[in-house]
Image: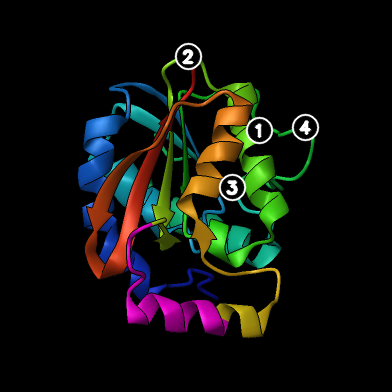
Amino acid sequence: MTDHRQQAPSAARNRDPILAVLRRVLPPAGTVLEIASGTGEHGVHFAQALPGLTFQPSDPNPDARLSIAAWVADSGLANLRPPLELDVTSPAWPVTAADAVLCINMIHISPWASTEGLMRGAASILPPGAPLYLYGPYRRTGVATAPSNEAFDRDLRQRNPAWGLRELEAIAAVAAAAGFSSPEVTEMPANNLSVVFRRL
């Protein structure tokens, strides 16, 4: 039987540092919508560690959803749902309410319109005080960008001119316009950041 589970080496490296932040910022119970879930490995890890929360993975890519569904089935976790097809730029999301939204390593490998759609959509389904958690590499005004991130940015832009590392200040401005707080930033391994916005 074909095993559709895909694996991303970065997921195994970053899942525990991310989990440490999530333990601090996520509510003790409720539904967590994961945007651009990719292989599905993060959802399994977080659902295992945080049994009080129900995790809803999603991805616009059918191959990714196939992998996510295989990971969900293999996990046997009651608090991990099958993946949904969700395009953040769509005006209507298949989820109408959530207690938190996670988005890991999407913003730099998608057009800017995806970041704008993420903020609009997350604001429409989150209650006041609920977190929108972002993870990935970002540029920050007045902070030198690591050489590895500069090289990564060049590689991304060669692959797709619409991709690339984003200015955190620009993301925060879009978030503010959508009704979110200023970001809480946590330095992470490998020159990444955890960024948490709260719905106002």
| Residue holding disc 1 | 121
* Foreground disc of the pair 3, 2: 2
Above or below residue 109? Residue 90 is: above
**SS assignment at label 3:** loop
Instruction: Please report the residue visible at 28 percent of the width from the left and 22 percent of the height from the top.
Output: 28
| Amino acid of disc 2 | Pro
Spatial separation of the CA atoms under disc 4 and disc 1: 8 Å
Above or below residue 84? Residue 41 is: below
Residue 38 vs residue 29: left or right? right
Spatial separation of the CA atoms under disc 3 and disc 1: 13 Å
Decide which of tag 2 and tag 4 comes sooner along the chain: 4
* Start-end of magenta stretch: 142-155
| Residue holding disc 2 | 128
Color style of the picture: rainbow
Question: Percent x, y for residue 97?
Answer: 58, 21
| Residue holding disc 4 | 92
Instruction: Please report the residue visible at 20 percent of the width from the left and 45 percent of the height from the top.
Output: 20
Secondary structure mostly seen in magenta is: helix
| Amino acid of disc 3 | Ser
Spatial separation of the CA atoms under disc 4 and disc 3: 14 Å
Q: Which mark is residue 58?
A: 3
Question: Percent x, y for residue 112?
Answer: 67, 55
**SS assignment at label 2:** loop
For mark 3, does the 10 Å Cα neighbourhood hold few (<14), some (14 to 19), or many (20 or more) residues?
many
Instruction: Please report the residue visible at 33 percent of the width from the left and 68 percent of the height from the top.
Output: 144
For mark 4, does the 10 Å Cα neighbourhood hold few (<14), some (14 to 19), or many (20 or more) residues?
few
Decide which of tag 3 and tag 2 comes sooner along the chain: 3
Instruction: Please report the residue visible at 40 percent of the width from the left and 59 percent of the height from the top.
Output: 41
Whether residue 77 is visible, yes or no, is: no
Decide which of tag 4 and tag 3 comes sooner along the chain: 3
Dots 3 and 1: beta carbons under 8 Å? no
